[in-house]
Image (tube, rainbow, N blue to C red):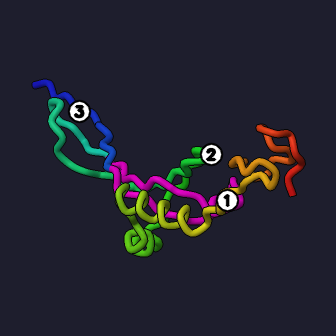
Amino acid sequence: MVFIFGNKGYGDPLGYIVTRCQKCKTDRIFFVHQVREKLTLYFVPTVQYKVKQYMTCLNCNERYEIADGLKPQVAERLMTEEQLKTTLGEIAAQTMLPPLHCSTCASPIDHGMKFCPYCGAKTS
């Protein structure tokens, strides 16, 4: 009798979290996902033997394994993609700088420009 054994990995997205990245040295958005390994018998998944959770920095793609003791804390702070977009939109609205206008011709100019692109006057 011939038995065909193997294993297969499954990935499950869990959500997003904002925390400090050790490589970037600043607060970043991380994608949190779970990887499960299952033993297969005749290509049918039968027994799950390994479960690990990882978080991946969306800026530098550095991947960190989440320790078992930290999983409940991470689960409390998880956000869905919609919640993340809402939070980022609120932060952007709070930190948005008011538009600048040229004092000579009143044309709108971008922050950081030293001269007006329309009349050439020096900005203050």
Query: Is 37 or 19 nearer to us in this picture?
Result: 19
Label 3 vs label 2, nearer the camera: 2
Q: Residue 19 magenta-drawn?
A: yes
Mark pair 1, 2: CA separation: 10 Å
Label 1 vs label 2, nearer the camera: 2
Which quadrant of the figure contains the C terminus?
A: bottom right
Residue type, label 3: Phe
Local crowd size for mark 1, using a 10 Å CA cut-off: few (<14), some (14–19), many (≥20) = few
> Which numbered disc covers residue 22?
1
Local crowd size for mark 3, using a 10 Å CA cut-off: few (<14), some (14–19), many (≥20) = few
Query: Mark 1 or 2 closer to N-term?
Result: 1
Q: Residue at x 38, y 57 (%)?
A: 15
Mark pair 3, 2: CA separation: 37 Å
Q: Residue 30 magenta-drawn?
A: yes
Q: Residue at x 30, y 43 (%)?
A: 10
Tag 3 near tag 2, CB within 8 Å: no
Query: Is 1 or 56 nearer to us in this picture?
Result: 56
- 52 with respect to 102 (left or right): left
Q: Residue 26, percent across and down?
A: 68, 61
Q: Secondary structure at mark 3?
A: strand
Residue type, label 2: Cys
